[in-house]
Image (spheres, rainbow, N blue to C red):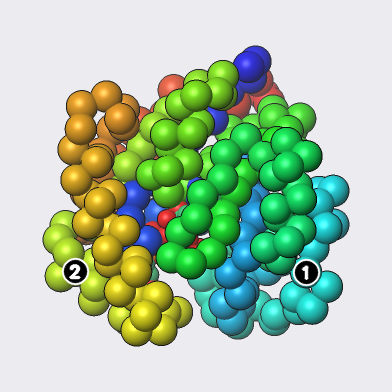
């Protein structure tokens, strides 16, 4: 693929991927573009639906919720997900619309080809936020991204972050913690990720992430100047 190399951000739910990604996008306007995934999970308060951004059928009942907090207001131009139904997603999968997909914590998630093309067309660094299954599937494609794993300092801290975020039921929290154990083990395997960042202190983790992406960021900035 031509243009800047995409970036895959992976790691356990609650490790801080979205937080770091929002910081990156806010500090580098016009450099990064988010690959808006599809999911069958329900929108969280404040999450924005990317309906209309691509061709897949969307869940008609999905509402555009008001931007409520500072975190979202920094990022309000970017949709969080295309919220859809299991049936619509299954049909799209059968049509071959996705480059990868996964079942995670009882819901379907996937990256459509259109989501990546939308970002590529703007010559931006495409950021994909995917779980470990997605990482494995993307490795079978010609996308050639930089693979970065964001890891929490410990399971205990991860659990606290997820509980404090107040987005999960006890059942979905337990599923996410179980998936996190698997993810934390796999991320230690040599060759799976180019870099593993431990997100203990947020500012330090952010500096590390920026350093890794510095070369690609400069390429995009120079192409624009
Ligand atoms: N270094 C940090 N120290 C303390 N809290 C943090 C840190 N990084 C992120 N958080 C908080 O932890 C919670 C989880 O972070 P975030 O939502 O970014 O995780 P995520 O990896 O994107 O999760 P998911 O995969 O479920 O979307 C958020 O409430 C966020 O504010
Ligand atoms: N394989 C994929 N995983 C994805 C995609 N979009 C998000 N995710 C991962 O799902 C979990 C849960 O996300 P949440 O928003 O419900 O908290 C997290 O690990 C994401 O990285 C995708 O398109 N493909």
- Quarter in which the C terminus is drawn: top right
**Image disc number at residue 113:** none
Indicate the quadrant where residue 219 lies: top right
Residue drawn at (65%, 51%) of the image: 36
Q: In this view, does 35 lie above or below 16?
A: above
Q: Name the element at disc 1.
A: loop
In this rendering, the answer to whether 219 lies above or below 152 is: above
Q: Where is residue 20 in the image (x, y as percent from the top left)?
A: 41, 53
The mark that comes first in sequence, 2 or 1, is: 1
Q: Nearer the viewer, residue 100 or 213?
A: 100
> Label 2, on which residue?
157
Above/below status of 117 relative to 18 = above
Residue at (63% x, 17% y) in the render: 1
Question: Residue 151 at x, y = what percent?
Answer: 26, 51
Secondary element at image label 2? helix
Mark 2 in CB contact with mark 1 (< 8 angstroms):
no
Determine the residue positioned at 46% across, 26% down: 139
Residue 12 position (above or below residue 46): above
Q: How many marks?
A: 2
Mark 2 beta carbon near ligand 1 (under 8 Å): yes
Judged left or right of residue 62, residue 215 is: left
Q: Is residue 178 visible?
A: yes
Q: Can residue 202 be seen in this view?
A: no
Residue 78 vs residue 157, the one in the foreground: 157
Please indicate whether residue 192 sits to the left or right of residue 168 in the image.
left
Horizontally, residue 80 falls left or right of residue 21, namely right
Label number found at residue 59: 1
Name the residue at the top extreme.
2
Q: Which residue is drawn at 65% across and 55% down?
A: 38
Between 37 and 84, which is closer to the camera in this rendering? Answer: 84
Q: In which quarter of the image is residue 112?
A: top right
Residue 110, x across and y down, in percent: 60, 48
């Amino acid at each position: 693929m031509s243009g800047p190399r995409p970036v895959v951000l992976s790691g356990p739910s609650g490790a801080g991927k979205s937080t770091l990604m929002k910081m990156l996008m806010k500090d580098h306007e016009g450099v990064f573009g988010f690959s808006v995934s599809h999911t069958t999970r329900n929108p969280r308060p404040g999450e924005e639906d990317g309906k209309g951004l691509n061709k897949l059928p969307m869940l008609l009942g999905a509402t555009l919720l008001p931007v409520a907090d500072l975190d979202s207001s920094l990022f309000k131009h970017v949709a969080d997900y295309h919220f859809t139904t299991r049936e619509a997603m299954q049909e799209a999968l059968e049509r071959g619309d996705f480059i990868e997909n996964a079942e995670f914590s009882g819901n379907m998630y996937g990256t459509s080809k259109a989501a990546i093309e939308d970002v590529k067309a703007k010559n931006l660094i495409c950021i994909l936020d995917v779980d470990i299954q997605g990482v494995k599937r993307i490795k079978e494609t010609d996308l050639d991204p930089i693979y970065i794993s964001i890891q929490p300092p410990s399971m205990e801290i991860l659990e606290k972050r997820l509980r404090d975020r107040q987005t999960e039921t006890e059942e979905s929290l337990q599923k996410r913690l179980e998936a996190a154990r698997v993810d934390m083990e796999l991320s230690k395997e040599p060759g799976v990720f180019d870099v593993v960042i431990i997100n203990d202190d947020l500012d330090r983790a952010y500096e590390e992430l920026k350093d890794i992406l510095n070369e690609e960021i400069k390429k995009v900035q120079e192409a624009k100047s």
